[in-house]
């Protein structure tokens, strides 16, 4: 099943990449609000993944961003974001990825995140470690906030949540080496797993944005919680870190209770 997951994510990524090359204005649509975008490619790629998995595993369930849930209570459930970072995809900013997780009995079993424009393929299987392009990866050993580079995102601003990430950001930016915003949660998480970021946080996301990336972080030796240190992520935000700066990061969010 892991080989099949790998193959499926690679094929989906190739479709995303080819889709980017032929993307035209009439293939770009607003979903609910003018800033919540989807393209025909998102839909085609999710359809491709679900059709392929269904042919191979007819008794598996699905949760996908574009077509929702079907038989999600089955032993195996595929959690799919065909393009994480659609806004970046539309603008040809290369930080977008196919994100596919497999849950078994409600628990993460495997995860794949493939960024085709950068040819980076992240993969993890529960209990078996995390890999980037076939090589084992591990979270960083940096324990100092002042030497940490962080990743984050700002979906909360569009959603009108208060306090939003602009309320938290100044204190975090002053205390660390800086932050990057790549516009795809799955990649922010994978960059923690690869030791590029010491931590990544977001205030609001959906399960398909983070299911694969969260397992990849854990399998790389990192820690994932909500913003209060509990397990209710992504509903109560998500903080993924190398473990060493997890507590000091949580303090930034506790202060704003
Ligand atoms: P998407 O591109 O698949 O929509 C950006 O910080 C991250 O937030 C991306 O992973 C993006 O995923 C996600 N995102 C965008 N709109 C969102 C929404 N309305 N709810 C939750 N996550 C969203
Ligand atoms: Ca998406």
Image (tube, helix red, strand yellow):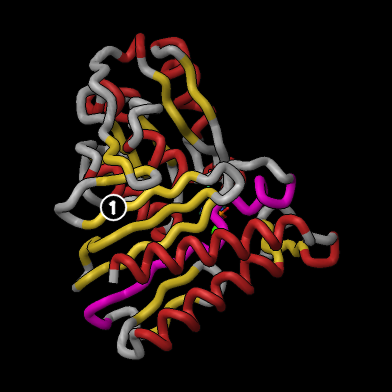
| Quadrant for the C terminus in the image | top left
Residue at position x 53%, y 52% in the image: 97
Where, by quadrant of the figure, is residue 190 drawn?
Answer: top left
Q: From what the image shows, is residue 100 above or below residue 146?
A: below
Q: Residues within 10 Å of mark 1 (few under 14, many from 20)?
A: many
Quarter of the view holding residue 138:
top left
Note whether 205 is above or below 199 in the view shown: below
Position of the N terminus, as image quadrant, is bottom left
Q: Nearer the viewer, residue 21 or 109?
A: 21
Q: Which residue is mark 1?
A: 124
Front one among 147 and 135: 135
Magenta residues, as a range?
74-91
**Magenta-colored stretch includes residue 89:** yes
Quadrant of the rendered image containing residue 103: bottom left
Instruction: Say which residue appears at 55% left-offset and 76% top-offset.
Output: 48
Q: In the rendering, at what x and y percent does residue 240 appear?
A: 31, 37
């Amino acid at each position: 099943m892991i080989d099949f997951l790998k193959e499926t994510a690679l094929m989906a990524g190739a479709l995303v990449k080819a889709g980017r090359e032929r993307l035209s204005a009439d293939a770009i649509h607003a979903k609910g609000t003018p800033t919540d975008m989807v393209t025909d490619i998102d839909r085609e790629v999710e359809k491709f993944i679900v059709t392929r998995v269904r042919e191979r595993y007819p008794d598996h369930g699905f949760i996908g961003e574009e077509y929702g849930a079907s038989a999600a209570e089955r032993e195996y459930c595929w959690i799919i974001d065909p393009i994480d970072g659609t806004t970046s995809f539309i603008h040809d900013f290369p930080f977008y990825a196919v994100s596919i997780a497999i849950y078994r009995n409600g628990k993460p079993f495997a995860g794949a995140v493939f960024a085709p424009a950068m040819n980076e393929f992240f993969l993890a299987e529960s209990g078996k470690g995390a890999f980037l392009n076939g090589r084992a990866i591990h979270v960083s050993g940096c324990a100092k906030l002042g030497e940490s580079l962080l990743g984050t995102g700002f979906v909360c601003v569009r959603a009108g949540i208060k306090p939003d990430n602009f309320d938290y950001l100044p204190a975090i930016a002053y205390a660390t080496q800086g932050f990057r915003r790549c516009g795809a949660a799955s990649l922010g998480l994978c960059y923690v797993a690869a030791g590029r970021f010491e931590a990544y946080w977001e205030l609001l996301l959906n399960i398909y944005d983070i299911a694969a990336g969260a397992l990849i972080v854990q399998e790389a030796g990192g820690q994932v919680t909500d913003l209060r240190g509990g397990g209710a992520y992504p509903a109560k935000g998500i903080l993924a870190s190398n473990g060493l700066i997890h507590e000091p990061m949580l303090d930034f969010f506790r202060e704003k209770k």
